[in-house]
Image (spheres, grey):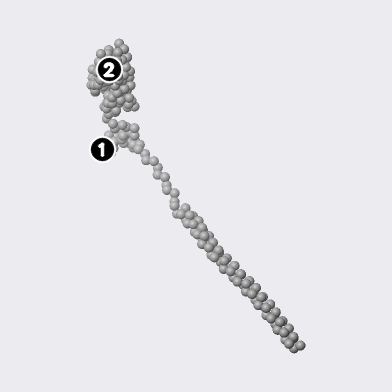
Amino acid sequence: MNTLTKFSALTLVCFTLSGCGGGGGEGGSTGTSTSSSNTATAPANNTSTPASTQTTQSQSQTQNDGAATPAEPTEPAPSYEPDPTLLDSQAETSNDLHVKADFNFSTSKTVTLDLSGQDVLGDSLANKMVKIYAMHEVVESYEDEAMADKALLATARFNNAGQITMTLDIPVNYKTLLISVDGMLQSNHLLTELNMQATTVAHQFN
């Protein structure tokens, strides 16, 4: 009987110890889980903080840059108009001279001649001699007295196809060109006025 009582008491003690140990295990597990959770959360908070700080600094820097850059003032366009009081007086030095903005300093102009056609008989102008004259006045006919002052600028020949293309540098003080073809009447010669805008003289003789 004593043996049975001791065995029962020993069994009860074992069950009691077993129950306490299990509870302790769960308690330990819970504590570990909570600690792990806290450990995992902390880096996330630490990581997000620099990004937020960097964004704030960038915005602040942008605002500072915008405020630190003043708008550059627009300079007025320069005026080249002369002093009216100087226009009525004689220039004493070259600094007192006034030149208009559209003044052309060139002393010659380039003119291209593009000539072709046939003579009065309908024959080709191939290999015919051509003479180019220039006059200082505007001349409209052979009867004009200014024809007497014509100056020979160039001499050329039509090619085998009865055409000629050539370029001349003509002084700007000449106002009229006379182009005469050997063997043709004066009425078939070409008188053309020169101006600063004209760069090509094209004509077909017949």
Q: Is residue 161 left or right of residue 76?
A: left
Left or right, 10 with respect to 186, comes to right
Q: Residue at x 74, y 85 (%)?
A: 4
In the image shown, does 39 or 2 lie closer to the viewer? 2
Which kind of residue does numbered mark 1 sit on? Thr
Residue most toward the bottom? 2
Q: Position of residue 159 (x, y in %)?
A: 27, 20
- The mark found on residue 200 in the picture is none
Residue 84 sits above or below residue 171 on the image: below
Q: Would you place residue 176 above or below residue 59 in this image? A: above
The quarter of the image holding the N terminus is bottom right
Q: Determine the residue positioned at 27% across, 34% down.
A: 90
Mark 1–mark 2 Cα distance, whole angstroms, equals 57 Å
Using residue 89 as the reference point, say whether residue 37 is left or right of it.
Answer: right
> Going 25% across and 17% down the picture, which residue do you hit?
128
Residue topped by disc 2: 126
> Residue placed at 51% from the left, 58% from the top?
55
Q: Secondary structure at mark 1?
A: loop
- Residue 151 visible, this orientation: no
Q: Where residue 9 appears, x then y in whole percent?
A: 72, 84
Residue kind at label 2, given as amino acid type: Ala
Left or right of 150 in this view: 69:
right
Label 1 vs label 2, nearer the camera: 2
Question: Hey, which residue is sitting farthest right in the picture?
Answer: 1
Q: Position of residue 111 (x, y in %)?
A: 30, 26
Q: Quadrant of residue 101?
A: top left
User: Which residue bears the numbered disc 1?
Assistant: 93
